[in-house]
Image (cartoon, helix red, strand yellow):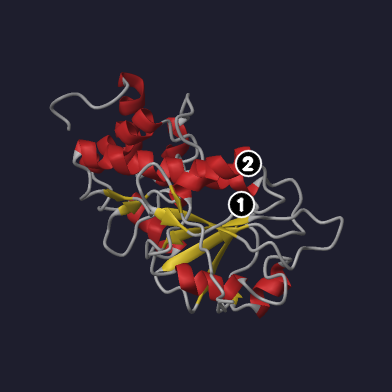
Amino acid sequence: MKKYLSKTITIVLITYNLFGVAYTFDRPEHVSENIWNSILPHLISESHPMKKTLDEIFHSNTRVVFNSKSLKKAGFKNTKPGKWSGTIVATHKKLKGYLVKMYTDDQKGYIDWAKFIDRVKGAKSIKKAIEKNGWNNIFKVPNKWIYPLPESPAPPIGYSRKNFVLLVEDMDLLPKNVNLRMWRGAPMKKTMLNAIFLLLKEEGLRDSVYAFNLPFSKDKKIALVDTEYHHIWPVHYLSLLQYLSPSNREYWKQLVKNGGPNSTSR
């Protein structure tokens, strides 16, 4: 009788999205198939330079996203939720050049997957608009990827389990006080105001009518950092007046009144 050697075979399930990018994630049991299929095109790929680092950080014996304290213990800084959005925008020394946007299990009422999909889609759409209009010398927008959290350890019963975090390119922004000076000063030229108005109008960027959502970066470009709310009209353009110099306020009013710059002012 023939003897057969027993061998262990490891099967890795690789899923491809419509663009042929490979992922090695399985759908968690607690995430519905519909939600997973919506997330799949926006997942971080296995070849992303930060994928293994994210695995090292979040695949832990403790629940990293349980609360602010657990985030700090895992090495994250700036773990306080945003005043208006509730979003935590944290940094980690192992994720140089990137930020992580997330919610913790003790934050109730936040649907992480829906918000992150909106942000990724918004960033992609804005990037296309910038390239189409030749505004790469004025604007930039971060690339964004969704990272699925491990199934275990799970949060205690009664908490609002979060299943995803968002990895975002760091735009190297100027400090808030410097940004406000840039908005009121010489860097804010009429050609830049023209481009801002047209981009807000074309993309329906409802929440990008505040200087803190259109901050200057160290390369003097304006970064589109809030991409969640896009293709939503009307846009309340006059909210930007408070950040402009007196002369630029008058010019901005004319842009709003006329629906954009005339051919000679572009």
Q: Residues within 10 Å of mark 2 (few under 14, many from 20)?
A: few
Q: Residues within 10 Å of mark 1 (few under 14, many from 20)?
A: some
The image quadrant that residue 9 belongs to is bottom right
In whole angstroms, how far apart are the C-alphas of marks 2 and 1?
A: 8 Å
Q: In the image, what residue type sits under mark 2? A: Glu
Taking the image as shown, residue 44 lies to the left or right of residue 101, namely: left
Q: Is residue 21 above or below residue 73?
A: above
Residue under numbered circle 2 = 33
Instruction: Pick whichever, 230 or 215, lies toward us.
Output: 230
Percent position of residue 8, x then y:
56, 74
The residue positioned 24% from the left and 27% from the top of the image is 261
The image quadrant that residue 204 belongs to is top left
> Mark 2–mark 1 contact, CB under 8 Å?
yes
Taking the image as shown, residue 257 lies to the left or right of residue 92, namely: left
The residue positioned 59% from the left and 45% from the top of the image is 36
Residue under numbered circle 1 = 27
Percent position of residue 113, x then y:
60, 46
Name the residue at the top extreme.
Answer: 258
Q: Is residue 47 visible?
A: yes
Instruction: Pick whichever, 139 or 65, lies toward us.
Output: 65
Question: If the image is split into quadrants, where does the C terminus sit?
Answer: top left
Percent position of residue 188, x then y:
28, 48
Query: Of helix, strand and loop, which one carries label 1?
Result: loop
